[in-house]
Amino acid sequence: MQTIEQLVNKEYEYGFVTNIEEETIPRGLNEDIVKIISSKKNEPEWMLEWRLKAYRYWLTMEEPTWPNVKYQKIDYNNIFYYSAPKTKPNLEGLDQVDPELLKTYEKLGISLTEQKRLTGVAVDVIFDSVSVATTYKEKLNELGIIFCSFSEAVKDHPDLVKKYMGSVVPYTDNYFATLNSAVFSDGSFCYIPPGVKCPMELSTYFRINAAETGQFERTLIIADKGAKVSYLEGCTAPIRDTNQLHAAVVELIALEDGEVKYSTVQNWYAGDKDGKGGIYNFVTKRGNCAGKNSKISWTQVETGSAITWKYPSVILNGENSIGEFYSVAVVNNHQQADTGTKMIHIGKNTKSTIISKGISAGYGDNTYRGLVRIGKNASNSRNYTQCDSMLMGNKCSANTFPYIEVKNTTSNVEHEASTSKIGEDQIFYCKQRGLNTENAISMIVNGFAKEVFKNLPMEFAVEAQKLLGISLEGSVG
Amino acid sequence: MNNKVTDSLSSPIENILNKFKIFSENGFASEPNWLKTIRENSLKSFQKLGFPSQKNEEWRYTNINSITKLNFETSSNKEFLNYSKQSIYKYIISDSYYLVFVNGKYLQNLSNPPKEEGVIVNSIKDAIKLFPSEVENYFSKNIDLEANSFAALNTSLFDSGVFIKIKENVILSKPIELIYISQNQENIPQLISPRNIIVIKNNASLDFVEQFVTNNSNKNLTNIFTEIYLDENSICNYLKIQNEVDENYHIANISVSQKTSSKFFSFAFSAGSSISRNQMALKLFGENSDTNMNGLYISTAKQLIDNHTFIEHTQPNCTSREVFKGILYDNSHSVFNGKVYVHSAAQKTDSKQTNNNLLLSDNATIDTKPQLEIFADDVKCTHGGTVGGIDANALFYLKSRGISPKSAEALFALGFASAVTETIENLNLRRFVDNLVVSKLEKCHGNISLPIIAHYH
């Protein structure tokens, strides 16, 4: 198995730093900082009020310690809470974007430039604390779709923001969501009007560039009655020795017959081989199937971050609503992941599916933690959960902590979990057919994760498969 | 003189501390020093931990507020004379040795202890006097008393229980049954703290039963701690029957240590008490050992039945199998929490865990948490959990054959239950449990009568 170890020992290829003039505010966190962030963004009074409410509440909270992850205590007063490239105000088109930035995204393979229009994905690009560009805005506008940065939405669509912000993840929700509510910098906002099926994939690309900053973005997606949207999220960060905090909040709302599909390929910098540096990815993602027959689907491929700690969840309020969670989480070296989902069945005939695939290598710790709760009135509800883990080497761990709470007799909940390794016989079988060991392993691992990949949009699926290969390099020996 | 007043004002925990003081000046004074130290340390642990609250992840679903409010009396030297062979007959499993305890006190005249060669059965207190170093070797060896408040409470206060040792190469011909009867003592809730130590030496074998029952309604708390040690190549079949009346409380810690090539089979039947909890912690210390941990719980009325199991694989080539099934009625609440932990050295571990629940009332709640923690790569570990009601098709099938809906449901429940009771190998034990299951289900389904289970070939 030597060959695998030698297999393209490719470094984290997105680890470069963009040399761009950035504007930051002083380190630390207090009411003034919250006010500065708000004023930097020219926010209306109500937004500042909300932030301050969240900040004051945050002061009363304690950092949770229950997850199965270990990290040094974060000094919240030693973080820059805002950092933005010094840009000209009011960007009209991409030609006004700093060429240095364009180059950065060119390097990351994100199509900002108009000539790459053919890829057919509308992108909102977040660089550190601000959104730098949103493509295809006009085209989407024609259909009545609002797709813009969160800051713009606060200014241009205050009614929608007021109505839905915090409706799924209230500012009192949890330590990191509350912190986010106080200091969130930017993010994406998306509203699909009734009956509209969004003709292209919408996408946000998050990039942390500045050192010692925290990234706190907020995404809000609303699918109105009968609307449909598929949304992609990607993330990268430079290689640095110190850990950086990323505490985002994502809220999805699907009204009657609405459908939101949210896919993430998370590839934050994971730290080096010895576990130095990397992103702390502490994210709150939650969807509300508010209307009848609505559907929310989370698909995530988690390969990056020093620590991943998130549970994309669905609250199934509407009758016949559907929640889905498909996840592949890979940990290598000293990465830690405590991830899973919550499916809260409240409405009748609600259905949820959870497919989670965990791959642990090196010294990685991988934990699936999920909750399925069937309320008393959620008659005829159904859940199917499958969590499979694969271990490579005996320095890593794979843990499964499902919580199942049922209060209804007509509902059915099934949970299955298994742990296995790549069998020598499996590799032998592949080699017999002319594959070399590394291809055999890549094939087996991809087969293991296939159920999840097939739920990703095409381009993402290809990238995810590649990523998986890279993340596991040198881990089988 | 003001004793009475202060007593009623003091908190239950202070009350326990007082009891300990009295005991350590009297009964415990003659005990060996090592035990005194452990008792004192355990008391300190308990003082520090207090009664667990729901903030403690291990107790997240188990609310024991009603226990913590009671000011318990600890078992006195009362004589229990109102028992006859007749009155305990129904608890005796046919063809077995049995020892009868009432509120922890041993009733010699009603018991039938084994007299076979190679078997030592003593009360734990006698064992401490007769062979203290042997008891010390097997005392609290596989439990963290600083983290387990009920085990710590038991260790600090225990004054009853048995020490059983099966010598090398001895295969006991009949099961040993411990019958614990909980009795109302002048309406004062009693804290009963038995401590059992079971040692099975190399190549020996034992069938061992603990049965908990009540003869009248009471609010006693049985806080038992049983330690089982299996030496190389030994076999233990352990059956636990928890069938106390609905008002009282039952907390049990069972810790099992297995050496090389040993086999352990357990079955826990829980149907009694208003709150009952089994905490089974099993550690596989030797290679090629085998564990089967099964159970059935049937909760009714406002009962809370909780089964917490923990299987730890520390050595390679061990197998563990776990099946727990539950049937829930009325406003009851059941909890299952099973954890399998595989250390990095425990390669080739083969582990399987299943928890199935039949929910038969919309007011009942099931919380289940099957968990895996795995640090070795060459392992086969699976777990599964299901919760559901009665399948409408199955019900229709039975009804179309002329069976009343009530009976059909009961039959369905019985089939569900007997799929796990049939794993009990000893036929006498299995029959005994099956009868309990049948009569419980008959009651739950409106006093119908169920056919006798006919799977004895």
Image (tube, coloured by chain):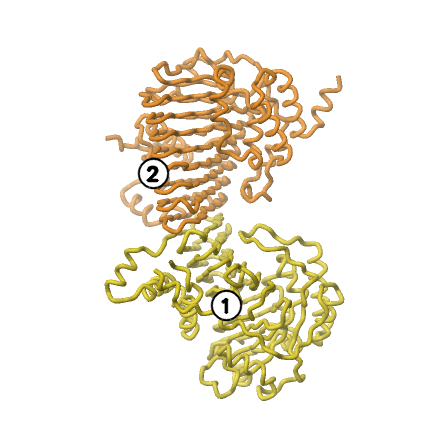
**Kind of residue sitting beneath label 2:** Asn
Q: Is residue A279 left or right of residue A301?
A: right
Residue at (37, 49) in percent of width and height: B379
Question: In what element is the residue under mark 1?
Answer: loop
Circle 1 marks a residue in which chain?
Answer: A
Out of B64 and A8, give the one closest to the viewer. A8
Residue A267: mark: 1
Which of the 4 image quarters holds residue B443?
top left
Question: In what element is the residue under mark 2?
Answer: loop
Residue at (46, 79) in percent of width and height: A199
Circle 2 sits on which residue? B288
Q: Judging from the image, what is the letter of the chain drawn in yellow?
A: A
Q: Judging from the image, what is the letter of the chain drawn in orange?
A: B
Location of residue A241 in the rendering, given as x and y in whole percent from the top left corner: 59, 64
Which of the 4 image quarters holds residue A211?
bottom right
Answer above or below: position of A93 versus A342.
below
* Crowd around label 2: few <14 · some 14–19 · many ≥20 (10 Å): some
Which of the 4 image quarters holds residue A328?
bottom left
Residue B38 visible in image: yes
**Kind of residue sitting beneath label 1:** Asn
